[in-house]
């Protein structure tokens, strides 16, 4: 048990946040160990390694990892590090290979991790090298609705416990249909910000009408995007809530309502209406009538670094984040609608995104504002909605009274503190799962 | 698209017709670069047909023997740009709203366009390839250099050449920039 809190950064009585956590070069390596070393992290999607011997190069935080499906169809995640001197054994982004060969001395690893060939095994090593103990370092992996998660921590709880009842909400997008989803990407780019800022921003619905007004307004005019105004957001009955550090916002809907994601326009709305109408019965079978008919996941983050679904903020330094944008669509969707959502996804989010590009200078300057001599002595204010969240009769989690709140951000930094102060998983709390999961959906899909 | 990254044999001998065409498009691309750097974005938009397709695929690390899949194709649903003129128009018009924060205050850009190759097609269209270095300076001290190639399909519309399709391929895997809020 931790007796004294080493890191105390968010004051839950006042909502004041210490800004040094965004810039401090001593904090960052601790985060890699305490947070990225023990969390379940999204690393890929089953559809990106669909066939035997398919591989995807990815990261567990900062550690390069090969996600691979071996010849028998089993998924593995290996540290991309030769067990001889530590060189990478794979330098491509993706591929279909049975073996990974180290370019330094030619050690060869099979795609189930085993060391199968060492040049000079007899002549140089006298046959005395223990090949069995020199297999590639393996991570624990598990999947949720096709998304592959990994952790280095053998003592971490199951992925199901880790996600907890956040899954009740995530299911409404990632697990709506039994036929599942498929992913494309990633698009990769480098943001000069701390990784926590884009994560925190996910449940900041307050900024949307202001930061993104120029694109939202023109998309309303040209594409029929529903109007986004502050007033509408303030009065919205939609919800903002937190479970285990995962930040959820969702909209209340009616059965068969089209989820108004980027890419749904005046021109194709009737096709989406038809699709949602046609798949509603399947969705109800999978998620039960209530979730399938009335809950639509909106902006959200998956602790620690999942940003708006299966998109990753990969830590690259106190002031640097490598960002990965994936497009995820339902497999059952007609090709034309997948294409519409994909085009909407990349023209609004991602490096070219009409929405996302406007976030960057805000995020960078928020970070910078905690670095200057005077700035670093001043806190950030996350007091919105203090004492206006709690338990809800219908919805699990710490639920805000209003859609616009900073409660989720406070919970995120509270979770950050918890991980940073924990000796091990024994010090990290998990909310008991109490939500009722109607329908046939499971963690696996 | 593949011609941007794979080998193509270009004859060195030049006929007068070819010279004329080449010079015409040299001027075309020089004017485009000035329109962008002088922030005459509506003039730039005018250089595209109404049914234009603006596409930027991803660029992957693959083995030499698999270079045919280095640049993702149009069947990939995670292209960096994959859009029509309406979205391009939104990009341009939003700059005038006063709240397009990525470009307000605007970037200072310099589009250096070079290595022009022009190839007339039997249907009257022209394929044109160019290489670019785009320098961007933003706010106080931020600097970005974008390098890449473009392949355009140009069509003669009402007495003017217009871009009916543009494929832009960046020479980067992880794009070392905070965003792509400037035009290529």
Image (tube, coloured by chain):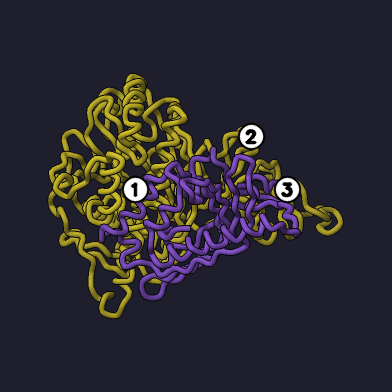
Q: Residue at x 75, y 59 (%)?
A: B12
Label 2 to label 3: alpha-carbon separation: 20 Å
On-image quarter of the C terminus of chain A: top left
The residue where tag 3 is placed is B65
Mark 3 nearby-residue class (10 Å; few <14, some 14–19, many ≥20): few
User: Relative to residue A421, is residue A43 drawn left or right?
Assistant: right
Q: Is residue A35 above or below residue A275?
A: below
Q: Is residue A151 visible?
A: no
The residue where tag 1 is placed is A301
Chain of the residue displaying label 2: A
Chain B on-screen colour: purple
The residue where tag 2 is placed is A52
SS class, disc 3 = helix
On-image quarter of the N terminus of chain A: bottom left
Q: Residue at x 67, y 53 (%)?
A: A89
User: In the image, residue A74 lies at what x, y percent?
Assistant: 59, 35
In the figure, the yellow chain has which letter?
A
A441 and A262: which is toward the camera: A262
User: Relative to residue B109, is residue B116 drawn left or right?
Assistant: right
Chain of the residue displaying label 1: A
User: In the image, residue B50 lies at what x, y percent?
Assistant: 42, 44
User: In the image, residue A320 lies at what x, y percent?
Assistant: 44, 64
Q: Is residue B161 visible?
A: yes
Label 1 to label 3: alpha-carbon separation: 39 Å
Q: Residue at x 42, y 62 (%)?
A: B178
Label 1 to label 2: alpha-carbon separation: 31 Å
Looking at the image, do the residues carrying marks 1 and 2 touch, with CB atoms under 8 Å apart? Answer: no
* Residue at the farthest bottom position: A373
């Amino acid at each position: 048990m931790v007796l004294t809190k080493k890191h105390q950064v968010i004051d839950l009585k006042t909502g004041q946040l210490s800004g040094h956590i965004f810039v401090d070069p001593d904090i960052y390596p601790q985060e890699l160990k305490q947070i990225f070393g023990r969390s379940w992290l999204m690393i890929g999607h089953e559809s990106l390694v669909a066939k035997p011997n398919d591989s995807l190069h990815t990261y567990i935080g900062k550690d390069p990892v090969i996600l691979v499906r071996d010849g028998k169809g089993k998924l593995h995640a290996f540290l991309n590090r030769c067990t001889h001197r530590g060189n990478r054994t794979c330098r491509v982004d993706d591929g279909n290979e049975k073996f990974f060969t180290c370019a330094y001395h030619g050690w060869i690893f099979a795609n189930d991790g085993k060391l199968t060939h060492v040049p000079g095994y007899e002549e140089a090593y006298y046959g005395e090298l223990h090949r069995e103990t020199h297999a590639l370092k393996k991570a624990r992996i598990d999947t949720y609705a096709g998304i592959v998660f990994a952790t280095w921590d053998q003592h971490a709880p199951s992925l199901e416990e880790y996600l907890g009842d956040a899954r009740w909400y995530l299911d409404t997008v990632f697990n709506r249909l039994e036929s599942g989803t498929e992913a494309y990407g990633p698009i990769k780019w480098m943001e000069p910000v701390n990784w926590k800022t884009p994560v925190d921003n996910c449940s900041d619905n307050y900024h949307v009408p202001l930061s993104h007004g120029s694109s939202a307004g023109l998309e309303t005019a040209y594409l029929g995007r529903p109007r986004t105004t502050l007033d509408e957001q303030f009065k919205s009955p939609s919800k903002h809530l937190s479970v285990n550090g995962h930040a959820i916002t969702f909209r209340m809907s009616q059965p068969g309502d089209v989820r108004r994601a980027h890419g749904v326009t005046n021109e194709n709305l009737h096709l989406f209406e038809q699709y949602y109408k046609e798949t509603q019965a399947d969705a109800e079978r999978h998620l039960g009538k209530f979730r399938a008919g009335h809950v639509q996941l909106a902006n959200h983050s998956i602790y620690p670094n999942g940003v708006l679904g299966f998109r990753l903020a990969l830590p690259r330094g106190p002031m640097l984040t490598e960002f990965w944008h994936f497009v995820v669509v339902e497999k059952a969707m007609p090709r034309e609608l997948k294409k519409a959502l994909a085009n909407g996804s990349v023209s609004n989010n991602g490096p070219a995104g009409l929405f996302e590009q406007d976030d960057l200078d805000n995020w960078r300057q928020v970070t910078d504002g905690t670095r200057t001599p005077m700035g670093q002595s001043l806190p950030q204010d996350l007091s919105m909605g203090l004492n206006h969240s709690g338990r809800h009769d219908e919805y699990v989690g710490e639920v805000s009274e209003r859609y616009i709140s900073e409660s989720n951000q406070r919970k995120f930094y509270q979770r950050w503190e918890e991980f940073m102060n924990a000796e091990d998983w024994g010090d990290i709390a998990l909310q008991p799962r109490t939500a009722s999961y109607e329908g046939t959906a499971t963690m696996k899909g | 698209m593949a011609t941007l990254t794979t080998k193509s044999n270009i004859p060195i001998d030049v006929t007068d017709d070819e010279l004329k065409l080449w010079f015409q498009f040299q001027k075309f691309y020089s004017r485009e670069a000035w329109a962008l750097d002088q922030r005459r974005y509506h003039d730039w938009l005018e250089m595209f047909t109404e049914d234009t397709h603006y596409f930027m695929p991803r660029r992957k690390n693959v083995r030499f023997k698999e270079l045919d899949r280095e640049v993702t194709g149009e069947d990939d649903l995670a292209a960096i740009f994959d859009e029509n003129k309406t979205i391009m128009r939104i990009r341009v018009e939003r700059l005038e709203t006063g709240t397009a924060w990525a470009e307000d205050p605007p970037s200072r850009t310099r589009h250096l366009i070079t290595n022009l190759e022009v190839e007339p097609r039997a249907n009257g269209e022209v394929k044109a390839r160019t290489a670019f270095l785009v320098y961007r300076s933003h706010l106080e001290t931020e600097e970005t250099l974008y390098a890449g190639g473009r392949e355009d399909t140009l069509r003669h519309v009402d007495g003017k050449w217009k871009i009916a399709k543009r494929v832009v391929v960046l020479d980067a895997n992880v794009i070392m920039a905070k965003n792509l809020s400037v035009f290529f």
